Image (cartoon, helix red, strand yellow):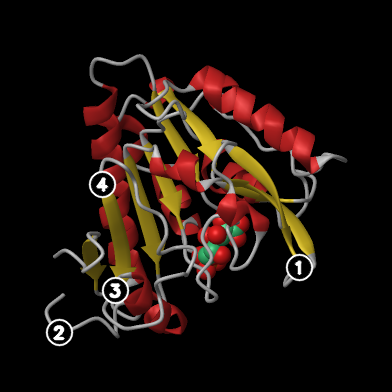
Amino acid sequence: MKSPTGAMIHVFPHLDSLIEAAANALTDHVVRAVDGHEFYTLALSGGNTPQPLYRRLATGPYRDLAPWDRVKVFFADERAVPPTHPDSNWLMAWEAWLRDGPIPSRQIFRMEGEAGDLHEAAQRYSETLTHEVYSGPTGFPALDLVLLGLGQDGHTASLFPQTAALDETLRVVAANDVPQLGAKRLTLTYPAIDAAREVWFMVSGAAKARRVAQCLGFIAGGDNLPATLVRPLGGNLHWWLDAAAAAQLPQGV
Ligand code: 6PG
């Protein structure tokens, strides 16, 4: 079913079934999208929701179902911490999937959250993306897939409400001051996310239900939320929800 904002919505009874379906869909997407290309390029998010997906992909059948040796992994955002810190998105993905998974480590590209100058780190990661990923029609690197989450305040990646990175139109990656967290982050910008061939949000839990309905345009109040403003140019926007997160969508969605 499509939302009023044009996103494809996929609802599953539980987080487990959502994760299983997302693991299948991701594996299938890698197989299809890499056909005729050298590499498949994927950007990961942090947070709690995707962790079981990463664990799932590290195990069992998924390891053998796609040519993972032709996948390059990037990050949608990173906290301003070293890669050994429990808050590091890289550490989470590394421990859950990448450390023991089949993707060669030379094809895993970490944002330098520990950098003294995050603007320089953002610039270096922009250059890495530009070098490693084919450009799309807008001149921005066109990742095959960006995985995103949704915060209770409507943020996604590290695009938080009322922060400067929301207005970035030229850079691929921004260093973003997030006063409401008293923290700095590195984040893909809108033009970088929107250049991706596919963008998938994964959201679970009742605490996000109202925001989900707002971002998808079913109830008022979502127009200016950072997650609502993600609009991939090719139109391939998918929201993967468990029933609790979908609870405020109309019946039948
Ligand atoms: C991060 C993120 C962030 C996350 C949302 C949802 O670094 O925290 O990438 O945008 O996706 O905050 O996080 P949860 O899945 O933990 O709710």
**Disc 3 to disc 4, how far (Cα)?**
17 Å
Q: Nearer the viewer, mark 3 or mark 4?
A: 3
Q: Indicate the quadrant where residue 134 lies.
A: top left
Which mark sits nearer the N-terminus, 3 or 4? 3
Q: Amino acid at mark 3?
A: Gly
| Label 4 sits on residue | 236
Residue closest to the eye, 218 or 246: 218
Horizontal relation, residue 138 to residue 167: left or right? left
Counting other residues with Cα less than 10 Å from the Cα at mark 3, is it few (<14), some (14-19), or many (20 or more)?
Answer: some
Counting other residues with Cα less than 10 Å from the Cα at mark 4, is it few (<14), some (14-19), or many (20 or more)?
Answer: some
Q: Residue at x 55, y 75 (%)?
A: 153
Horizontal relation, residue 181 to residue 148: left or right? right
Q: Mark on residue 179? A: 1
Which mark sits nearer the N-terminus, 4 or 2? 4
Which mark sits nearer the N-terminus, 4 or 1? 1
Quarter containing the N terminus: bottom left
Q: Amino acid at mark 1?
A: Pro
Counting other residues with Cα less than 10 Å from the Cα at mark 2, is it few (<14), some (14-19), or many (20 or more)?
Answer: few
Q: Secondary structure at mark 4?
A: loop
Q: Amino acid at mark 2?
A: Gln
Q: Position of residue 77 (x, y in %)?
A: 60, 48
| Label 3 sits on residue | 217
Q: Secondary structure at mark 2?
A: loop
| Label 2 sits on residue | 251
Which mark sits nearer the N-terminus, 1 or 2? 1
**Disc 1 to disc 2, how far (Cα)?**
38 Å
